[in-house]
Image (spheres, grey):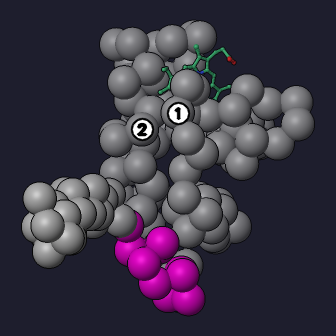
Amino acid sequence: MNWINSCAVLLLLASLIFVPSCYYDNEEELYPFVECDTTAVTYTETVLPVLENNCYVCHSAAANLGGITLEGYQNLLTYVNSGRFLGAIRRQEGFSPMPQNASQLPDCTLDQIEAWINLGAPEN
Ligand code: HEC
């Protein structure tokens, strides 16, 4: 194999390694200076999808792991008001880090949830 062929092989290998990695890039990593919008935060649009995607697998009414149900606004509110909801997702000392056995939620998501709590955790 001459060196031109070797180069072609290397290029091919490099593209195989790097191209698929694009699928895992997320907006926050690609554009680290994109502002996190914490203004238009609501229960339905902001908080609920996070719970559905990251928490209901263990904390739906049916699953109720650890005796904790976050499904339904009133149920969630109990944990918001006790501080356990924010303590767990912010992974503060004295709280079980959530979501369990998974990475911490993205910073922007945490900021948006906290902004919603600071608005009084409205059912909107
Ligand atoms: C894989 C299952 C699993 C997932 C996913 C999960 N939890 Fe939990 N969670 C548990 C279990 C089990 C407990 C009770 C034992 C413990 O505290 O570690 C618990 C406890 C908690 C507590 C009480 C913690 C405390 O220290 O008082 C809160 C609040 C909580 N979870 C919120 C969440 C939120 C919010 C999410 C999603 C972002 C989530 N959990 C995702 C299993 C899970």
Q: Residue at x 59, y 11 (%)?
A: 66
Q: Is mark 1 within 8 Å of ligand 1?
A: yes
The residue singled out by tag 1 in the image is: 102
Asked which quadrant contains residue 35, the reply is bottom right
Q: Residue furthest right?
A: 93
Q: Is residue 91 left or right of residue 28?
A: right
Q: Residues within 10 Å of mark 1 (few under 14, many from 20)?
A: few
User: Which amino acid does the dot numbered 2 rest on?
Assistant: Asn
Q: Residue at x 88, y 30 (%)?
A: 94
Of mark 2 and mark 1, the one earlier in the sequence is: 2
Asked which quadrant contains residue 43, the reply is bottom left
Report the magenta residues as a range: 26-36
Q: Is residue 100 left or right of residue 26?
A: right
Q: Is mark 2 within 8 Å of ligand 1?
A: yes
Mark 2 touches mark 1? (CB < 8 Å): yes
Q: Position of residue 30 (x, y in %)?
A: 42, 78
The quarter of the image that holds ligand 1 is top right
Is label 1 in a helix, a strand or a loop? loop
Q: Is residue 100 above or below residue 86?
A: above
The residue singled out by tag 2 in the image is: 54
Q: Residue at x 61, y 63 (%)?
A: 107
Q: Position of residue 111 (x, y in %)?
A: 63, 67
Report if residue 96 is visible in the image: yes
Q: Quadrant of the N terminus?
A: bottom left
Q: Position of residue 51 (x, y in %)?
A: 42, 42
Q: Quadrant of the C terminus?
A: bottom left
